[in-house]
Image (cartoon, grey):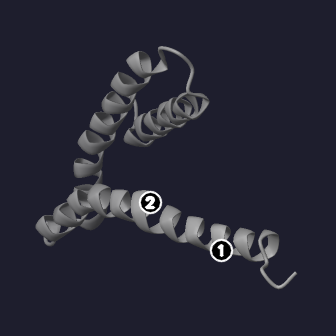
Amino acid sequence: MIPRTLWMTFALLVMLMTFILFAFALNGVLYAAIPLLGICYGVLYAIMVPTVSELFGLRHFGLIYSFMGLGNPVGALLFSGHVPGSSWSLWTGCYLEHNFDSSD
């Protein structure tokens, strides 16, 4: 029997390779990358529930399970809107300030 930690490690490594495939944006890569990503998320979600119950017990399992469900939406909100938006605003402000100074 394969331990859960090895399953989690394997799923995360496949996810890393999938995100690297996304970054290269080669033709036809979406046909292979999206199913791989979905399978990895499914494996991780299926493994996390019994792992959390083993680590923290069943006393507060409902609360911990709810926080696990909030992880993806909160991460998507932060890493798709707030973090890139604020870094983009900071970068463009510095760029405009240094390259298009009106005091020359």
The residue that mark 2 highlights is 79
Q: Earlier in the sequence, mark 1 or mark 2?
A: 2
Residue 56: percent from left, percent from top: 27, 66
Residue 20: which quarter of the image? top right
Please say if the residues under marks 1 and 2 sit with CB atoms less than 8 Å apart.
no
Q: Considering only vertical position in the picture, is 88 above or below 33?
A: below
Q: Secondary structure at mark 2?
A: helix
What residue lies at 48% left-to-right and 19% top-to-bottom? Answer: 29
Tell me the CA gap for discs 1 and 2.
20 Å
Residue 41: which quarter of the image? top left
Residue 7: percent from left, percent from top: 41, 34
Give the crowd class for mark 1: few <14, some 14-19, many >=20 residues within 10 Å. Answer: few
The residue that mark 1 highlights is 93
Task: Name the residue type under label 2.
Answer: Phe
- Give 84 or 97, whichever is nearer the viewer: 97
Which circle marks residue 10 in the picture?
Answer: none
Quadrant (top left, top right, bottom left, bottom right) of the N terminus: top left
Q: Considering only vertical position in the picture, is 27 above or below 41?
A: above
Give the crowd class for mark 2: few <14, some 14-19, many >=20 residues within 10 Å. Answer: few
